[in-house]
Image (cartoon, helix red, strand yellow):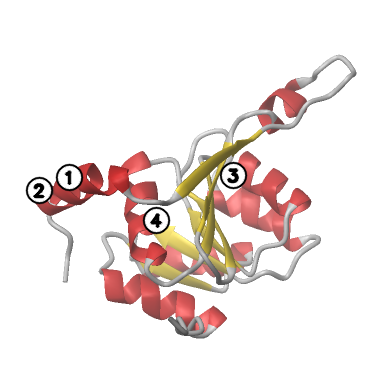
Amino acid sequence: MPVRISNLNRILTTTTTTTTTTTTTTTTTTTKPDDSTVEKSKAIKNINHTTGSNILLAEDNQTNQRLVQLILKSHKYHLTIVSNGKQAVDAVKNNRFDLILMDCQMPTMDGYEATKIIRKTHSTPIIALTAHANDENIEECLAAGMNSYLCKPYRQAQLVQIVEKFLGKPEPDET
């Protein structure tokens, strides 16, 4: 079912009291910082849940970030959120991810360029998150090295289905 803005706003305001842990990771250096060091020092949000696979979300829109977080929270995935392609490339260099959800249109570096760079050293599945559903755009996603795509706006079940396609279903709680 599609998410209504009024429901999303209600969910966003009521979930601020949840037990989701948000930490900020920064990189420091003892040498003179250059542009890449400054970029690396930008915060990367880690949203950790009890168990599950590690997923990187590269998405510049905070509402979309929060929506993906809420959807995947109940499925016990560890979610790391970055806001542009450059941060995604840096996160992949420094962490292990089982899956990457990559917005195609972001500032600093778009998802296509980030995917091409990541593909040089990693085979992690990458799912494009795109607002453009035409054949040309889908071909561009696949040509960049993305494994699949999900067109925005997507439904909760569609996101969960494509994540589970690449990662399988998480183990159920034994509680």
Mark 2: amino acid? Ser
Q: Earlier in the sequence, mark 1 or mark 3?
A: 1
Q: How many marks do you count on the picture?
A: 4
Residue found at the far right of this picture? 31
Amino acid at circle 4? Gln
Distance from disc 1 to disc 4, alpha carbons, whole Å, reads 14 Å
Badge 4: residue crowd in 10 Å (few <14, some 14–19, many ≥20) = some
Left or right: where does residue 5 sit relative to residue 70? left
- Going by the numbered disc 1, the residue's amino acid type is Asn
- Amino acid carrying mark 3 in the image: Gly
Residue furthest out toward the top = 32
**Disc on the earlier residue, 2 or 4:** 2
Q: Nearer the viewer, mark 1 or mark 3?
A: 1
Separation (CA) of disc 1 from disc 3: 27 Å
Work out whether 72 lies above or below 102. below
Residue 125 seen by the camera: yes
Residue, disc 3: 85
Residue 5, percent across and down?
A: 14, 49
Q: Residue furthest front?
A: 175
Q: Which residue is mark 1?
A: 9
Q: Is residue 35 above or below residue 153?
A: above
Pointer 1 and pointer 2: residues touching (CB < 8 Å)? yes
Q: Which label is found at residue 69?
A: 4
Cα–Cα span, label 1 and label 2: 5 Å
Q: Position of residue 148 (x, y in %)?
A: 50, 73
Horizontal relation, residue 78 to residue 61: left or right: right
Mark 1 or mark 4, which has the lower sequence index?
1
Mark 1 touches mark 4? (CB < 8 Å) = no
89 or 114, nearer to the observer? 89
Q: Residue at 63% across / 41% down in the picture?
A: 87
Specify the label residue 6 is tagged with.
2
